[in-house]
Amino acid sequence: IPSTTIDRVQIDCQTIMVGLFSGPKMVLVFLAVLCFRGITAFSTVGHSVGITKLAVELGPLSATADAKTAISNSRIPSLASIGTVTFLIPHSDADQLKTTKFGKAAPVENPSVLEAAQQLAKKCEWFADGLLDTNIVPIPSANDNDSSFIKEELLGTNVLIALGLTQDDDLKFCSSLFQDRLTQSNLDLKNSQCQFALDCAGAISAEDLPSFVGPYNVASPVSDLKAKLFPWTGVGSGFRLAEQMTSLFQKWSSDEFVFAILIFLNQFSGSEVDWVKHSIDATWEKGPIRNAQELYAMVSQCGDCIGECVKDDNCRECLDKLTENDTRDQVASYRTIVSYESELLRDFSFCILQKNNIFNCDATIPSLPKVKPLTSFRGQPMTEELARSLLVGHLDDEAAPSGAMKVDTSWIVALGGNEAYDKFPSQNQLFYPAARGRDMWYDPVFRVETLDGRCVWCKRHYKVRPQHVPGTFRFSVLDNGITSDEFWTIIDVADDLSWIVFHYAGAASAVGQRYLGGLVCVPPGGTLPDASELPRVWDAVRSAGMEPWELYCVDNDTTTPAYVGAGAPPLDFFRKEVMEKRAAAAAAK
């Protein structure tokens, strides 16, 4: 099976084609549509492809000077553990040394190496539903008699991440450990392992801290050759994962960081990781038969939708862009989708993913971390009615709480905790009661700077249902043809309504995606909460498993050319009709 970069391929449309792609599945869609529509050529510029005809809360350990104790404490694994992740940190001052990468877009200073490692360890466990063991191990000092014991124990960890090492003794220990793991004779063990040195600098060169991913050795020309010649093998998988993990690590986002670790474990640990086990891409890992089955199902069940999408320049360009991403990467995928969203794209996604679930995906709302809602407001016990009014916030609605500004928006997002969904500029939130019953509507209206440089407004229309515990809600929305189900919690809110903190956990079952996020919101036209209020805000953020350094400052400047060029936000696009129904219902009484 060749693995070559091709510019143009002539297709025999009388033959059923199966692509064994290293790129995403959307290219298979192009093949299918072009064959069935009688088109005999297509372009896959820049993609490496092969084509063949087919007759076919364990809490993380705190850093301590006693590294042997840290190792020993990690020996009791989680129930049905899928693996072990170890963060190797400096032997001293890890709680003082600031990372230079994490928290660059946050409203607070960078975290220390220890703080970063602790949060990453927590998130690894949460994202793995508590089935992953995580350790934070300080490198032993040069004269530590237990150095050999610690090294021996670290030889067995599945994922080893050296973080923020700068001292020569630490780097020497790490180099020796990395070399021993790379050259160990137990290949079954090594093939279930990976290691990376990140944000490390000093007298040791990068070559002395060799990375590897399963059977693939990043620094080995032989491994490179094997990966390119035999892309369907474990070495090929390791090669692709090494590139993807390195790219994700370099974003220095805690979510992306953990995502990189989980996709490795899903591939090489021998156990599926629910957070990342599903892929709607055509991959070497799936193999020719499964790729062929998915291709046939797409064409036979959604051929018309596929054809209409491919004939449209905007929809086709979106699919082309998606081929550049792993669709499990929610940040890259969602930004692409919102850049090109259209009715054709919605119909395409709905048919393939939501209606027919071609890829047999499933996902449930994450249950970790456990987040508690606020229990009172202005001295009054929290009730469903009171919680509903806090959502309505400053919107000019009869359901708004006393002291609200009564303007055209409930809240605006000042800080967000999820890079895929919370980082967009000018995020307006509208919460308001439905025409009848206890339910509500939530309309986020946000500005998107598209991949091709345009500034446009996007909007969504969520159904909101109060849950049994006051201050908690269930949200659902059809977003570009995919249903998302979310659980929201009001964590805290200022008595004067100058800020509110939300947490959400969600799932898009049709694409097998799960996600977490958090928002610090303020009144329209507002900025970050007053400095005197920030300690309480940060406490609320931390109670939901987030750290202030993980948050992103949202651009709410209404004077920029980008904002002005996008025009007025369509705030009443959905609400206008609901208000008319409410008025009609009131008149009928």
Image (spheres, rainbow, N blue to C red):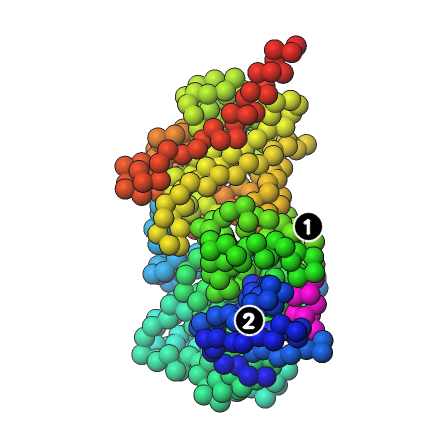
As for residue 42 lying within the magenta part, the answer is: no
In the foreground, 192 or 156: 192
Residue 28 drawn at (x, y percent): 59, 67
Residue 456 in view, yes or no = yes
As for residue 293 lying within the magenta part, the answer is: yes
Q: Residue sitting at 35 percent across and 31 percent down?
A: 526
In the rendered structure, the answer to whether residue 162 lies left or right of residue 29 reads left
The three-letter amino acid code for the residue at tag 2 is: Thr
The three-letter amino acid code for the residue at tag 1 is: Lys
Residue 435 drawn at (x, y percent): 61, 22
**Could you say whether the residue bearing mark 1 is in a helix, strand or loop?**
helix
Q: Is residue 544 above or below residue 315?
A: above
Q: Residues within 10 Å of mark 2 (few under 14, many from 20)?
A: some
Q: CA distance from mark 1 to mark 2?
A: 30 Å
In the foreground, 460 or 82: 460
In the rendered structure, the answer to whether residue 357 lies left or right of residue 233 reads right
Q: Where is the N terminus found, in terms of image quarters? A: bottom right
Q: Which residues are magenta?
A: 288-297
Q: Residue sitting at 60 percent across and 38 percent down?
A: 475
Exactly how many numbered labels are in the figure?
Answer: 2
Residue, disc 1? 355
Residue, disc 2? 40
- The tag earlier along the polypeptide, 1 or 2, is 2
- The chief SS type of the magenta part is helix
Q: Residues within 10 Å of mark 1 (few under 14, many from 20)?
A: some
